Image (spheres, rainbow, N blue to C red):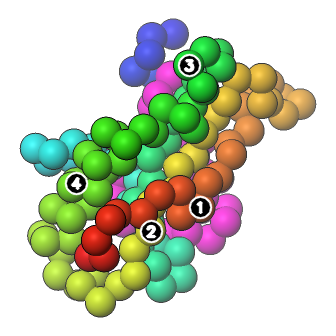
Amino acid sequence: MDRQQIGKDAEKQALAYLKKQKLKLISHNFSCRFGEIDLIMTDHEQLVFIEVRQRSHAHWGGASHSVDKRKQQKLIKTAAYFLSRNSRYNNTTCRFDVIAFEANTSDRSGDSCPIWYKDAFRPEATF
C-alpha cells in the first residue's frame, strides 16, 4: 500500500472516530495556496481544524511529533483563509486538534487506535 492510500485510510478512520465522539463534518481536505487541512468539524459550538497523522514507526518522534512549528504555521494560515471565506464562523471559537495513529497502537482487530490531542497548539494571535 502506498503512502497516499495509507494517509487516506487514516483520515477515514479519524473521521469515523470523531463522528462517534459527536463531532460534525464541515469540510474534508480543505486546501488553498497556504496548505491543506485534513478535517474541519464542529464540536458543539467550536470549530475544529484537525490534522491527521499516521506513522508506521516511531523514528524521528512519531506521528504526533511530526506536527512541528512549520506545519502548525501552515495549518494556522490555511485556517485563517478558510475563516475569511466562511463568514458564518466569524464569532465561533476555534481550536486545532491532532489525531495521531502511532506505531504499535492497535486494537484486537489490528486497526490502529487514534490518539486525540485536543487543542494541540494555538496561534500566537487570536483570530
Mark 3 highlights which residue? 60
Identify residue for label 2. Answer: 95
> Residue 55: x and y, percent?
58, 23
Residue 51 lies left or right of residue 88; in this view the side is: right
17 and 101: which is toward the camera: 101
Label 3: state its secondary structure: helix
Q: CA distance from mark 2 to mark 3?
A: 26 Å
Sequence-first disc among 2 and 1: 2
- Distance from the alpha carbon under mark 4 to that under mark 3: 25 Å
Residue nearer the viewer, 88 or 63:
63
- Residues at circles 2 and 1 in contact by the CB criterion of under 8 Å: yes
Q: Residue at x 10, y 44 (%)?
A: 33
Label drawn at residue 118: 1
Q: What amino acid is labelled 4 in the image?
A: Thr
Residue drawn at 30 percent across, 76 percent down: 126
Frontmost of labels 4 and 3 is 3
Task: Give the residue type that dot 3 points to.
Answer: Trp
Badge 4 vs badge 3, beta-carbon distance below 8 Å:
no
Within-10-Å neighbours for mark 4: few <14, some 14–19, many 20+: many
Task: Using the numbered discs, state the Cα–Cα distance from disc 2 to disc 4 in whole angstroms.
Answer: 13 Å
**Which residue is pictured at 79% across the width and 30% down the height?**
106
Q: Which structural element holds mark 1?
A: strand
First in residue order: circle 4 vs circle 1: 4
User: For the residues marked 3 and 1, what is the alpha-carbon distance in whole angstroms?
Assistant: 22 Å
Contact between marks 4 and 1 (CB within 8 A): the answer is no
Question: How far apart are the two marked residues, 4 and 1, measured between alpha carbons?
Answer: 19 Å
The numbered mark, 3 or 1, whose residue comes first in the sequence reads 3
Q: Amino acid at mark 2?
A: Arg
Kindly identify which residue carries mark 4.
Answer: 78
